[in-house]
Image (cartoon, rainbow, N blue to C red):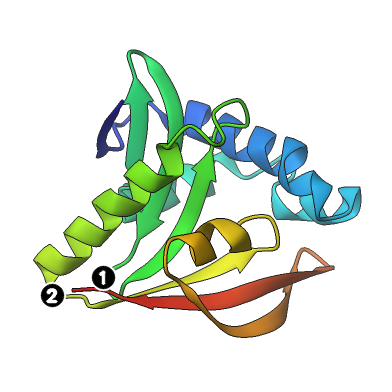
Amino acid sequence: MKIRRYLIGEERELLSLLFNTVHRVNRRDYTQAQVDAWVPADYDQQAWVDRLSKTQPWVAVQGDEILGFAEMDDMGRIGCFYIHHDRLGQGVGTALLESIEAESLRLGIHRLQVEASVTARDFFQSKGFSLVRRQTVERRGESFVNYQMKKDIG
């Protein structure tokens, strides 16, 4: 497995990975209406392309297969953090998080923050993140529970 930055032309595959992960994995912890609002089938393609060009996520790949991707902004906030539904528990998330932590330290960022889904909370806790608070957020008319979490590094 290799971790590298996103390449132009991968937008469709990353959106497909996001959609399938949310609809197959996160669906265990959220209702169908919630996952449909989270990542709708008619997701705005141009908005997605614009987001990726701005965030330049890290992408985990093995050969030609994309295994997962993750974003972090210049304040240490982790955005999208998604692993292919068939690759969970295989070290992909750990590898992506290690890349984010290394980049954080290189940039002088010593605290990471994430709004973890119910599904992802245990993963982030197992990697040293602590709970700041439980919160309810809204997206496309649906309310979701997630968790603000943080981790001090370096």
Residue 115: numbered disc: none
Q: Position of residue 47 (x, y in %)?
A: 52, 49
Q: Quadrant of residue 115?
A: bottom right
Q: Secondary structure at mark 2?
A: loop
Dot 1 and dot 2 residues touching (CB under 8 Å) = no
Disc 1 residue type (three-letter): Asp
Q: Which residue is mark 1?
A: 74
Disc 2 residue type (three-letter): Gly
Q: Is residue 143 left or right of residue 26?
A: right
Q: Is residue 107 left or right of residue 85?
A: left
Disc 1 from disc 2: Cα separation: 10 Å
Q: Secondary structure at mark 1?
A: loop
The residue sitting at 35% across, 37% down in the picture is 59
Nearer the observer, 11 or 105: 105
From what the image shows, is residue 132 above or below residue 42?
A: below
Among numbered discs 1 and 2, the one appearing first in the sequence = 1
The residue sitting at 35% across, 53% down in the picture is 97
Density class for disc 1 (Cα within 10 Å; few <14, some 14-19, many ≥20) is few
Q: Position of residue 142 (x, y in %)?
A: 83, 66
Q: Position of residue 3 (x, y in %)?
A: 27, 35
Q: Which residue is mark 2?
A: 108
Q: Quadrant of residue 55?
A: bottom left
Q: Is residue 147 left or right of residue 104?
A: right
Q: Residue furthest top?
A: 63
Q: Position of residue 61 (x, y in %)?
A: 35, 26
Nearer the observer: mark 1 or 2; the answer is: 2
From what the image shows, is residue 145 above or below residue 26?
A: below
